[in-house]
Image (cartoon, rainbow, N blue to C red):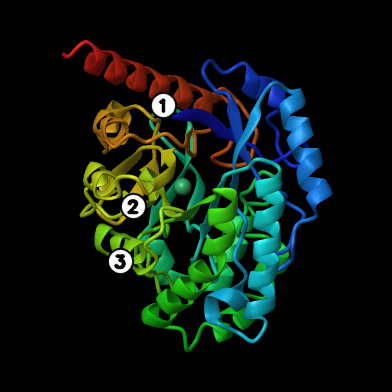
Amino acid sequence: MQMTLRWYGSKFDTVTLSQIRQIPGVTGVITTLYDTVPGEAWAPEKIRALRKEVEAAGLTIAGIESVNVSDAIKVGAPERDAHIENYIKTLEALGREDIHMVCYNFMPVFDWTRTELARKRPDGSTVLAYTQAAVDALDPEEMFSSINGDMNGAVMPGWEPERMAKVKELFELYKDVDAEKLFENLVCFLQKIMPVCDKYDINMAIHPDDPAWSVFGLPRIINNKENILRLMRAVDNKHNGVTFCAGSYGTDLRNDLPGIIRALEGRVHFAHVRNLKFNTPDDFEEAAHLSSDGSFDMYEIMKALYETGFDGPIRPDHGRMIWGEVAMPGYGLYDRALGAAYLNGLWEAIDKAKKRGI
Ligand SMILES: [Mn+2]
């Protein structure tokens, strides 16, 4: 595995590449071009410039999170074919820059959903949190304004104001798209991009839905073992793979996280490893990465990755806001650096125990 950190680019991130370079064991970043619009092809020279910037700091681009899929592709609108052609051009350009992992999601309208971006924990840190009662009491537009007020001036991916201004239109677009239709559109998209992925050895890694159930009546299709295995079988190509995100699959306590990893052996191309603390089954907050701070057994998650031969990029996920840091919620430096060190420690212990036959 390669330990990485998500980085939003020098224009948008409060964390610098030189800070990331000093986290022990972190050798790469997961990044993207933030001034692109889903459906457009990325300019090869911008990818080249981004790569040069990252490499000049002594790091590599370990993968892209994300090349976003347009709503037209998700709903099967008339512009779909043109957008898929552009997606293919983007993949070609990434392949030529020696980038071989692309994360994406197929969530309708909203990317991840949280109801609070700064819930206070007993240790004084603040974290992202979700409570179903709050979602049930809100309509989607109110949801956006309540989240937007709490972003520390940052723009969260998937929650861009221009996009949220059109929430009503977006809901309209998805009104005839049920889970089955969405799944069909996903399969169609993957079948069309697999040849270019084969040519450039690009591992596509679908991010699960977060939370792992329907929000505001919108369909969710990547949320448990059965559904993700169905997608793996529907497009049975190694390049059709998965981002294993502990904090997303883990929102549903019925999901057995190490079991999902083991069922996906050979198809997990990227891992987001973080911990959640459940107060009730539908109220959770993001915890420190350590097992003891949350509800997941992080050792078993790392062991399942190790034992299935996982060799892709991995990153700590949302961190708590600690030590007075002001940053994009979930994406400060300090707690994610602690997370990376902890995950590296677990990996080293598992690796040495295996090699010594313990
Ligand atoms: Mn994730």
Residue that protrudes farthest toward the left in the picture: 358
Q: Which residue is mark 2?
A: 249
Distance (Cα) linking label 3 and label 2: 16 Å
Q: Earlier in the sequence, mark 1 or mark 3?
A: 1
Q: Are marks 2 and 1 in contact (CB under 8 Å)?
A: no
Q: Which residue is mark 1?
A: 123
Distance (Cα) linking label 2 and label 1: 26 Å
Q: Position of residue 84 (x, y in %)?
A: 63, 71
- Tag in front: 3 or 2: 3
Which of 145 and 92 lies nearest the eye of the viewer?
Answer: 92
Residue shown at the point (76%, 39%) measured from the top left: 50
Q: Position of residue 10 (x, y in %)?
A: 77, 36
Residue shown at the point (64%, 30%) measured from the top left: 60
Q: Secondary structure at mark 1?
A: loop
Residue shown at the point (45%, 19%) measured from the top left: 341
Question: What amino acid type is highlighted by mark number 3?
Answer: Arg
Picture disc at residue 230: 3
Q: Quadrant of residue 8?
A: top right
User: Is 84 positioned to the left or the right of 42 in the image?
Assistant: left
Q: Earlier in the sequence, mark 2 or mark 1?
A: 1
Question: What amino acid type is highlighted by mark number 1?
Answer: Asp
Task: Residue 328: tell me if it is visible.
Answer: yes
Picture disc at residue 187: none
Q: Position of residue 7 (x, y in %)?
A: 64, 37
